[in-house]
Amino acid sequence: MEPEVVGRKAEERSESEACPAQTNLDRVVDFMSSMETKRPDVLRRTSAWQAIRAVALSDVTAVNADGLYAQSVVTQHIAQFWSHSWHGSKRQKVCTLLLVNNGLAALCAGTCAAVLTAFFLSAAMGQTAEEGSTETTLQGQYHRIYATSRPQAIACNLSGLLVATFLLLLWRPGTSVFLDRVCVHQSDRELKLAGLVSMSAFLKQSQVLTVWWDATYSSRLWCLFELAAYLKSHSGQEARLSVRPVFLGPLAMGIFLGFSFAVLGVMLLPRAGTESGTILTRIALTTAAGSAALWYPLSTLRRFYRSVDMMHAQMRDFRMDSATCYCCSSGHENRMLCDRQIIERCIVEWFGSLESFEQTIQTTVSSALTQQLGKYSFPVSWMWGCSCPVLWTFLAPAIRQPLVGSFFILGWMIAVPVIFMIGASLAYKLRGQRLNHWLDGASTLVCALACVFSYMGMETLASVLSSALQTYWTSVAAFAASMLLIMLSLWCCWQRGSLDRIRMKPQKAPVNNEVKVPPRIESL
């Protein structure tokens, strides 16, 4: 938050006013460090969807301040305090806000739409003659279902994608949150001043502090004040700190669309054994379609890892001196009190020294980020959500022929984590920026080809097991056991990297009013 402190011009102040100015500074610091509200009606909350709308329209100058303030209500407690910098990317922030607050509802609605579409098409089209036939081998059943269910599978994918997109944009979550633009009046001078000096009280009454982190967050003094006030006000209990990088949203959307286009491409390709589907033709088309579909999400994933590295570097090297505020940047032309003086004195009052607060950021907050994201920096639960288009596509054969169609659901449960872990691990290893666009593109291409070849390897494994074992259920059991072994091996390697993190430890500050209990980590 970047508030304005209204005051007289510096040249209008005389030396006789120095003492009253210092007295005013002391009063403001004493009041803000006490964490009390200036007046009862300034403690307010709004709904999450109103807050998202306010962030999305933050650049629209015609937005009425009274109208924004009217969207908040007086409260005694706040579920989430949203701490963020207004100087970062608004597009990334809006994407992440939508995914975190609306993503689960969107995926559930998309899955319901895909299921209903599969049932409707199954009832409308009935059973074909080819579906009534039986195949004894895994490969035979796979090709039969593949041939008879492609139109329905594509329809399920598209219906789920359409409904999920609709809900993602229009769902209205009712979680009570605090957002400065809505809950602090932006034009009424008295209400704005009352809200600003009561900011620490808002944080004291907040259950969760959600930090929407971007590259500018650690450089904004008021953002650091919000973080310090929350940690101090919850020092005698378990604080709930959630650190969410704003670039996680565009990345998740890219992976989601990549899975959707990749599985559509696979369904549209001619299958091997047909007149237009020789093995070499299918390999070539699968490689081209898969690389094209996965190019953007993997390129975004590499940039994401570079951003995570930058975040960790910012926390590791954090210093209060590097943070800025608007009044200092403008030369204090229209200000009587300096925001930096107020904030630094409050932090010293709470933590004993600026160095103690810096150590808290470098250890506790850094640990919160590391434990939430892990070394590979993408939550596992988000991996399943991003792969939902694959599930929606496989619902059609699973519903039309539940006994043999369940093989496709098994493939989603086992194959998707394997492909994701291979692609993400390579993207992490090759995350560095290359000397030119060609080398950078080659790094992304290596990641995409690894994912495509891992998928083709699974198809080859299923074909080999089908030829060797000859019976359907024996082949399915052997394929599931083989893939499960591969997945567990990759998972152990993944976890070994994810556990390379900074463990949170209560810091030993030389003062009595230190933060004694580290924040409890909120899962993403």
Image (tube, rainbow, N blue to C red):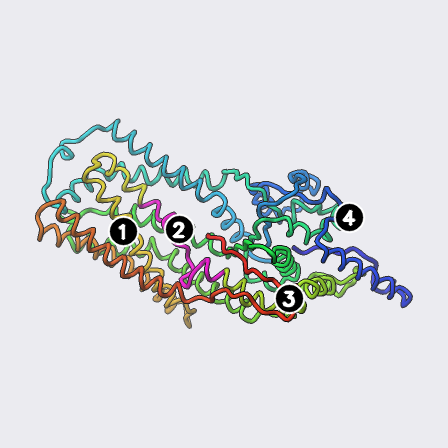
User: Disc 1 or disc 3, which is closer to the eye?
Assistant: 1
Which of the two residues, 248 or 437, is positioned nearer the viewer here? 248
Q: Residues within 10 Å of mark 2 (few under 14, many from 20)?
A: few
Question: x and y percent of residue 166 in the render?
Answer: 45, 38
Q: Answer yes or no: do the residues labelled 2 and 4 have beta carbons within 8 Å?
A: no
- According to the picture, the residue beneath numbered tag 4 turns out to be 189
| Residue drawn 90% across the image and 65% down it | 14
| Amino acid type, callout 1 | Ile
Question: x and y percent of residue 438 in the render?
Answer: 37, 68
User: Disc 2 or disc 3, which is closer to the eye?
Assistant: 2
Q: CA distance from mark 1 to mark 4?
A: 59 Å
- Mark toward the start of the polypeptide (3 vs 4): 4
Q: Is residue 313 left or right of residue 40?
A: left
Q: Secondary structure at mark 2?
A: helix
Q: Is residue 506 left or right of residue 277?
A: right
Q: CA distance from mark 2 to mark 3?
A: 34 Å
